[in-house]
Image (tube, rainbow, N blue to C red):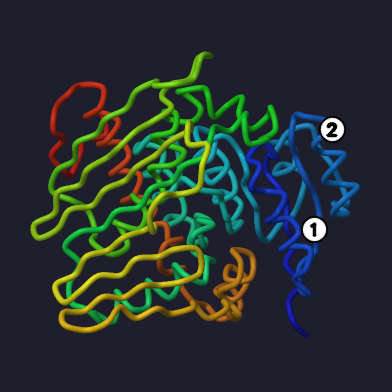
């Protein structure tokens, strides 16, 4: 008989969780057992929309009282390490929303706890389930147009509050301690994760951040991180003040034998002395259509979490973010690897 996985939801303050909960609900061998969060209206929504059997006023109480196989963590960045450590102590696998944490020291705690307990730890990056990003990943890893020497990705919108995020979400995104920074942590993280995946840890990092347009307190509303590798540059751009669509393809990758640019669901591939090739990214296929689907696939088949969502790649992305933050605040280039202090 196929195993039924008992899932508990630890916190509901990361707005990505609502889409993920519907993915969990669609899984045939998953039972949504419980939810724990301090906001009664969010708990009620999870119960009403998704049928969580039992509700608790905190994720800590839920973990203390429930026998679970998987925890879906959707907390403030700064709380993710606490959830992983508590779940790991009970042998519970964890899937947590991006980015991995608020600080590098917290990401290291998460990796250590998962390894010690022998649990699966996955960081759920929405970009991992994009058809275009999956096609880009496949072609870059195959070396189709040679080694990468420049990778740039911009993540931007007009701000969490302005685009309709819940107050429970933007409330902590605008808190430097809980988020780790502002737009820098929220949105440079995507390129940091991709660069960690394709290029690994850089040798050096420069970061920049500022408040350019917001007229209310935020840690930063625009940021940039530049990564220096032995034979490549990586660039992460973030903005909470962009009111329009991207003005150019995104991401853009230059390789030794050409370039790949992504625009919506199309890839534009250039090679020397050839016309630009336009490719429509094929639809995602099982088990790579969502975080829950991939997570269950790995558990069912005894496979490690790989790619963008692996704990190792996500941890390296956190080191890039930490280096960018330290550089932005000090005005100095950060050499990697970093010390935790």
| Quarter of the figure with the N terminus | bottom right
> From this viewpoint, which residue is outermost toward the top?
216
Q: Say if 295 sits above or below 341 in the image.
A: below
| Quarter of the figure with the C terminus | top left
Q: Mark 1: few, some, or many residues within 10 Å (few <14, many ≥20)?
A: many
Q: Mark 2: few, some, or many residues within 10 Å (few <14, many ≥20)?
A: few
Residue 269 placement, left or right of 278: left
List the residue tagged with mark 2: 41
Residue 123 placement, left or right of 260: right
Image position, residue 133 (x, y; %): 44, 67
Image position, residue 258 (x, y; %): 20, 74
Image position, residue 81 (x, y; %): 49, 40
> From this viewpoint, which residue is outermost toward the left?
230
**Residue nearest the viewer, comparing 42 with 270:** 270
Q: Say if 243 sits above or below 49 in the image.
A: above
Give me the residue at 83% from left, 30% from top.
40
Give me the residue at 50% from left, 32% from top.
78
Image position, residue 158 (x, y; %): 53, 34
Label 1: which secondary element? strand
Q: Say if 144 sits above or below 12 in the image.
A: below
Compare marks 2 and 1 and give the one earlier in the sequence.
1
**Residue nearest the viewer, comparing 77 with 120:** 77
Give me the residue at 60% from left, 72% from top.
289
Judged by depth in the image, the label closer to the viewer, 2 or 1, is: 2
Give me the residue at 45% from left, 21% from top.
213
List the residue tagged with mark 1: 32
């Amino acid at each position: 008989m196929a195993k039924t996985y008992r899932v508990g939801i630890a916190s509901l303050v990361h707005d990505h969780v609502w889409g993920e909960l519907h993915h969990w609900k669609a899984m045939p061998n998953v039972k949504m057992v419980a939810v724990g969060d301090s906001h009664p209206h969010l708990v009620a929504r999870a119960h009403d929309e998704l049928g969580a059997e039992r509700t608790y006023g905190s994720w800590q109480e839920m973990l203390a009282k429930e026998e679970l196989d998987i925890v879906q963590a959707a907390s403030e960045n700064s709380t993710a390490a606490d959830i992983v450590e508590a779940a790991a102590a009970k042998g519970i696998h964890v899937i947590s929303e991006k980015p991995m944490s608020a600080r590098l020291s917290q990401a290291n705690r998460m990796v250590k706890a998962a390894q010690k307990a022998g649990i699966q730890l996955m960081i759920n990056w929405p970009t991992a389930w994009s058809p275009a990003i999956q096609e880009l990943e496949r072609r870059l890893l195959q070396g189709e147009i040679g080694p990468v020497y420049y990778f740039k990705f911009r993540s931007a919108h007009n701000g969490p509050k302005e685009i309709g995020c819940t107050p429970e979400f933007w409330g902590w995104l605008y808190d430097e301690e809980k988020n780790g920074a502002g737009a820098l942590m929220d949105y440079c993280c995507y390129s940091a994760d991709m660069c960690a995946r394709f290029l690994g840890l850089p040798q050096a990092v420069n970061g920049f951040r500022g408040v350019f347009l917001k007229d209310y307190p935020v840690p930063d509303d625009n940021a940039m991180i530049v990564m220096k590798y032995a034979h490549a540059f990586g660039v992460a751009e973030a903005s909470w003040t962009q009111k329009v669509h991207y003005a150019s393809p995104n991401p853009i990758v230059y390789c030794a034998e050409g370039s790949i640019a992504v625009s919506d669901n199309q890839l534009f591939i250039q090679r020397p002395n050839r016309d630009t090739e336009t490719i429509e990214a094929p639809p995602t296929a099982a088990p790579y259509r969502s975080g829950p689907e991939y997570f269950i696939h790995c558990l069912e088949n005894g496979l490690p979490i790989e790619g963008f969502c692996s704990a190792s790649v996500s941890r390296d992305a956190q080191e890039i973010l930490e280096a960018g933050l330290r550089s932005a605040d000090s005005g100095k280039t950060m050499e990697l690897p970093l010390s935790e202090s």
